[in-house]
Image (cartoon, grey):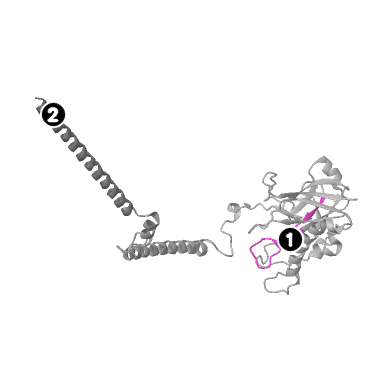
Amino acid sequence: PATQRDMAEKSNHDAAAAADAANAEASAANADLDVDIDATNEEARPCRGAAFLRFLYNRNTGQILGRTGVSWAKIGAFYIVYYSCLAGFFVGMLSVFLYGVIVEDIPYRTGENSLLQMNPGLGFRPQPSMDSTLIEFVQGEPATYAGEMANLQQMYDTYKEMELKPDNVNVRKACEPDSKPDREPFKVCKFNWTRWLQDCNPSTDFGYAVGKPCVVLKMNRVYGWLPDPLDPEVPHPMVTCFGENPADTENIGELEYFPSMETNYTGTPARMGYFSQAYFPYLKQVGYRAPLVAVRFSNLRNNSLVMVRCELRNLRNSRINTVDRDGMVRFEIFKRVR
C-alpha cells in the first residue's frame, strides 16, 4: 500500500508539472501573437501627412482634391454657365435702368416728388469746413482768414470762368433784373460778380481785411422752379438776415446787401437782397451759374459771437421750416480784435 500511494503521488506531481509547462507554452505563444498584431497595426496605420498628400493627388484613382478630371470639368462648365447667366442678367437690368429710366437732361424725380419738393433752400460761403458753420477771423491778420479767402476765391473763379467765355448760342442776351424768367429758358445768363456783388470781391479781400466781412448766399438749384412773388412790383426771391437771439440782434450791427432793393410785401418798406428772376428756371443748362447775394456786416461788435439766420422772403412757393432748414440758412460769425 505504501508503494501504491507513492506511485499515485508521483503520478499527480508529474501531471501538475505537465500542466504548468503547457500553460507556460500557451502564455508565451499568446505574447508572441500580441507582438505580431501590434507590429502589423503600426505598419498599417498611415501618417497624417501621407493622408493629406493622398487627398491632393491619389495615384491609385487619379483623383485631384477628391475629384477626377472629368468631374472637375463638369462642375467647372456648370459654374461658367451659371455665373455668365447672372452677369448677363445684371448687365441687362442695369442697361434698362440707365437708358430706360434715367434721362440725362431731366431728373427722374422733379416737382413735389423731388428731394427738395419745389422748396429751395439756402447755402452760404465761406465755409472752409463742412463740419462747421462758424466764420471766425482776426481783423488785420490775413493768416486767420486764409481759409475763408480760399473758399470764396474758388467760388469767384468758377463764376469768372463762365463770365469770360465768349458768348455763344447758349447765352441769353436779356439778363436785366426786369427780364422775364420764361424768356429763352434753355439759355443762361452770365453772372457778373463785380457788377452784382460790388465791393465783395477778391480785390478787397471780401471785406475781411477791414473788419467788414462779406458772406455770399446762394439758392439751391431746383429743377424747373420759378419764383411766385408776393409783391408783383418786386418779382424776385428776396433774402434777409438777422440775429437769432436778442443779444445777436444787438451785436450784428448794420447789414448791406448786394444786390438789393426795397419791397413792401409785408406792408412795411424794407431793403433786402434779391436773387434776380432772370436766372430762373434751372433746367440743367450748360454753363448755368446760380444768382448770388452778398451780405456785408458793416459794424459787427468786436469779440462777440453772433448767430445769424437768413431767410427767403417774398415767395408764395417757398416755406420756412426751422427743423428741416427749408428756405433758410444758419451760421455764426466771430470778429476778433487783438
Q: 247 or 277, which lies in front?
A: 247
* 302 relative position to 230: left or right: right
Numbered circle sitting on residue 291: 1
- Amino acid type of disc 2? Asp
Callout 1 secondary element: loop
Main SS category, magenta section: loop
Location of residue 14 in the rendering, given as x and y in whole percent from the top left corner:
16, 35
Q: 2 or 316, which lies in front?
A: 2
Q: Residue 286 appears in which quarter of the rendering?
A: bottom right
Give the distance between the C-alpha atoms of the residues marked 2 and 1, in whole angstroms: 142 Å
* 118 relative position to 149: left or right: left
Callout 2 secondary element: helix
Location of residue 96 in the rendering, given as x and y in whole percent from the top left corner:
48, 63
Residue located farthest toward the right when viewing the structure as drawn: 338
Residue drawn at (75%, 52%) of the image: 231
Numbered circle sitting on residue 272: none
Residue drawn at (57%, 56%) of the image: 109
Q: Is residue 270 above or below residue 152?
A: above
Among numbered discs 2 and 1, the one appearing first in the sequence: 2
Q: Is residue 102 magenta?
A: no
- Amino acid type of disc 1? Pro
Read off the residue under disc 2. 6
Report whether residue 199 is seen.
no
Q: Which residues are magenta?
A: 270-292
